[in-house]
Image: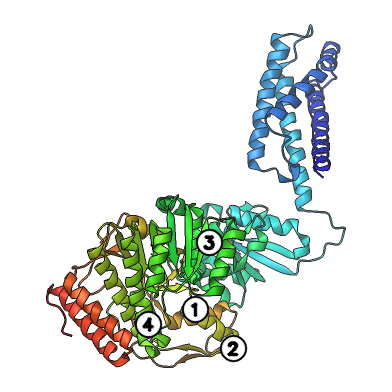
Amino acid sequence: MRTRITSSVWVRRLVQVGVDAALIALAYYLAFVLRFDAGIPGRYEDLLIQTVGFVVVMKLCLFALFGLYSKLWRFVDQADFGSIVKAVVVASFMLIGALFLLSPTAADPPRGVIALDFLLTLALVAGARFLVRAVVERPLRGALVQRADREVLIVGAGLGGQQVALELRRNPELSSAVLGFIDDDPRKKGMLVSGHRVHGTTDDLARVLDDTKPDEVVIAIPSAPGILRQKVVTACRERDIPVRTLPTTFELLSRGPNLLRQVREVQVEDVLGREPVRSEIDRVGAYLSGRVVLVTGAGGSIGSELCRQIARVKPRRLVLVDRGEHNLFEIRRQLEEERHFGSLTAVLADCKDADRMRELFQEEKPSVVFHAAAYKHVPLMEENPVEAVRNNTLATRIMAAAAGKVGTERFVLVSTDKAVTPTTVMGASKALAEWAIEEAQNRFRHTRFAAVRFGNVLGSSGSVVPIFRRQIAAGGPVTVTDERMTRYFMTIPEAVQLIIRSGDLTTGGEVYVLDMGEPVKIVDLARKMIRLSGKEPDVDIAVEIIGRRPGEKIHEELFEPGEQPQPTPAEKIKVAVRPRPDPEWLETAFARVQELVYNGDAAALAGAVTELSAERALQASEPATSAPKL
């Protein structure tokens, strides 16, 4: 097979060299013919005959040196044209030196011949290549060309848009024709790009859609902000025109080279109206390289993405901890088979098991721990408050103690904005988990403990988005608890980047929060998702207001009343500065909570958590040192 491929390459190169040799000889001959209208004089005819072979060989050698035979002509582009120009210019100077300085014949060529030879060689050599590309891109399909089944308008006349247009031309089986482009660069308006007109900017989109009536719109700007996507989607949905979009650069790199097959439906995270927070994981996660890193909840939505991102920076060993057999098996399979990362240990264990966690930390001695294991379904936690506190709070305390005792360098807790002034069991359990981190920082000062608060994570278990998708797929209704309700949203990659970045920033005891822009109204999110599915809210699918659940807030907060948000060196990441509670108060508080949990006294636990939260809020405004009453 390799011999066959090699011979095929050499045959292709010989054909290209042969064509160029003929074109170079033709250009040299035509230069003499065009210079002498009445016919080539005898002495110059001798010069032509004696030097044409030398000219052809010299130029072919220079063309090879400039890489003109290293690719198929059907794929030539602007960069290749630059190489052709350089090669022809150098060849012309070499020709001048050879003919005028070395004087191989009695007659020197006229200067006009040299100039014409330069222009003709450039035109013929470049023209042949671009002609091949044009023929390939617009294949002849007979006298009767079948009309395209779909007409596509492309948003974005940059490289992505041009590639989409090129793929549509190259693949007639797609039965799609390009109507033109929309681009916000005013210099492109009315211009032809890849043979198609730029009809205007996104401000003109409504008019262009009405004039051209496309069957589909493709957003060909991988880095398009959410506001732009939302503008396009809104205009198209009003006219019942489907919209697809190119993926982000990260998705492009992870999915492969075929651009057209990567065009996907617009997703709700594309139109949330703010720029996603991005960081360079290779840079901000460099502190994990060569270290032992432990991730709890490794098979969950956040934990699994954490593992995938951490694997990119090549830790010495990645320890995956999860109590779910299937989830743990799946993330290990992904890392080993898809990411080709084998320096890992999969541990099937429960973080609430103190003895097992002590054994694990003694065995692995992790340098960095990301504690993502948690219960987060609000209604379920209301029904199971004891287990919520046992899993979210006491398990965090167990993990932090195990990390501190073996000298772990950094410990990052995944928290939630529901921990701020909590009104639900789940929120209260995570607030207590943040306290557990503070307590651990007091006990183990050589370990840097930190917590990271999130808003709602799109696509994670417990997020409203998968629930809405299921309700839409079932034909509705889509249920919203309160029409006024708002929430902060972020994507899973954003959440993971914040976790990893926070581990790098922490000096000990901080709570980090992502600046997630303006909160989103849940009812608006529901209606957007219905429109993205091709339906009309309250017409095709009903939006039903069902009333708030116990303890559910209308608006979530990111900071406690006594906390002061301060900037950090990381873009859009803030740290909550708050008074440190009295260490004795914390120890006494956890002793009380732990006793009630182990006794299974749900009613007393709820009262104790409420009382402790009130005392902690009082400490934030007037730091107190007294212990809570038992």
Say left or right for 42 vs 622: right
> Which dot, 2 or 1, sits closer to the camera?
1
**Residue 320 on image: x %, y %:** 48, 64
Query: Disc 2 to disc 1, how far (Cα)?
Result: 15 Å
What residue sits right under mark 3 in the picture?
A: 201
Give the mark nearest the N terminus, 2 or 3. Answer: 3
Quick one: SS at disc 1? Answer: helix
Query: Disc 1 to disc 3, how far (Cα)?
Result: 31 Å
What residue sits right under mark 2 in the picture?
A: 475
Q: Do the residues bearing badges 4 and 1 touch, measured as CB atoms within 8 Å?
A: no
What residue sits right under mark 4 in the picture?
A: 388
Say left or right for 375 vs 131: left
Q: Amino acid at mark 4?
A: Ala
Q: Do the residues bearing badges 2 and 3 touch, measured as CB atoms within 8 Å?
A: no
Q: Residues within 10 Å of mark 3 (few under 14, many from 20)?
A: some
> Which dot, 1 or 3, sits closer to the camera?
1
Residue drawn at point x = 65 percent, y = 54 percent = 257
Give the mark nearest the N terminus, 3 or 4. Answer: 3
**Residue 379 on image: x %, y %:** 41, 87
**Residue 233 on image: x %, y %:** 54, 72
> Which dot, 4 or 2, sits closer to the camera?
4
Residue most extreme to the top: 106
Q: Amino acid at mark 2?
A: Gly
Quick one: SS at disc 2? Answer: loop
Asked if residue 223 shows in the view, the reply is no
Question: Any mark on residue 465, and which?
Answer: 1
Query: Disc 3 to disc 4, how far (Cα)?
Result: 52 Å
Say left or right for 188 vs 562: right
**Is residue 8 placed above or below 160 in the rendered structure?**
above
Query: Disc 2 to disc 3, how far (Cα)?
Result: 36 Å
Q: Do the residues bearing badges 2 and 1 touch, measured as CB atoms within 8 Å?
A: no
Asked if residue 59 shows in the view, the reply is yes
